[in-house]
Amino acid sequence: MSESADNSATPKEEIDRSTLLNAAMCYAIHSKNHNLLNDILDKGADPNFFYPNQSPKNRKKFTKALVHFYTYGMKAIEELQTEGTVYL
């Protein structure tokens, strides 16, 4: 089976920190990791974040961020320690 279907053809876009934190919050909830959830909330995730109320552009960015966390797990969470810009 060929590995030709990679993400290199997809243009990367900047994902803001609040979107990353909200996606990380969802990851922590789904993985039932209460300590991680508390840590992410302390970093500024919005517990009132409601996905359907987001604009289509923001939903697309959120979905990219959520897939990133489910793909890379704790490695992606560790990347939140840096304050730099994230492109996914």
Image: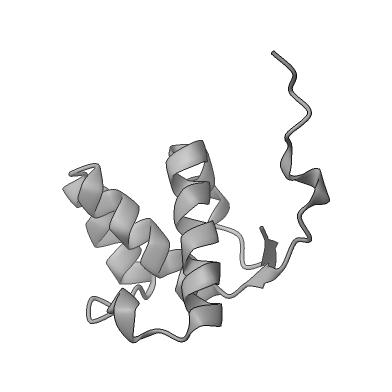
Q: Residue at x 29, y 68 (%)?
A: 41
Residue at the front extreme, as displayed: 1
Q: Nearer the viewer, residue 43 or 48?
A: 48
Q: Nearer the viewer, residue 82 or 17?
A: 17
Q: Position of residue 69 (x, y in %)?
A: 46, 48
Q: Nearer the viewer, residue 37 or 49?
A: 49
Q: Position of residue 26 (x, y in %)?
A: 30, 58
Q: In the displayed structure, would residue 14 be above or below residue 7? A: below
From the viewer's perspective, is 19 left or right of 27?
right
Q: Nearer the viewer, residue 65 or 24?
A: 65
Q: Residue at x 69, y 71 (%)?
A: 14
Q: Residue at x 53, y 73 (%)?
A: 17
Residue at the top extreme, as displayed: 1
Q: How is the image coloured?
A: one colour
Q: Residue at x 17, y 50 (%)?
A: 34
Query: How many numbered markers are drawn?
Result: 0
Q: Position of residue 70 (x, y in %)?
A: 43, 43
Quadrant that contains the N terminus: top right
Quadrant that contains the C terminus: bottom right
Q: In the displayed structure, would residue 2 be above or below residue 43? A: above
Q: Position of residue 56 (x, y in %)?
A: 50, 81
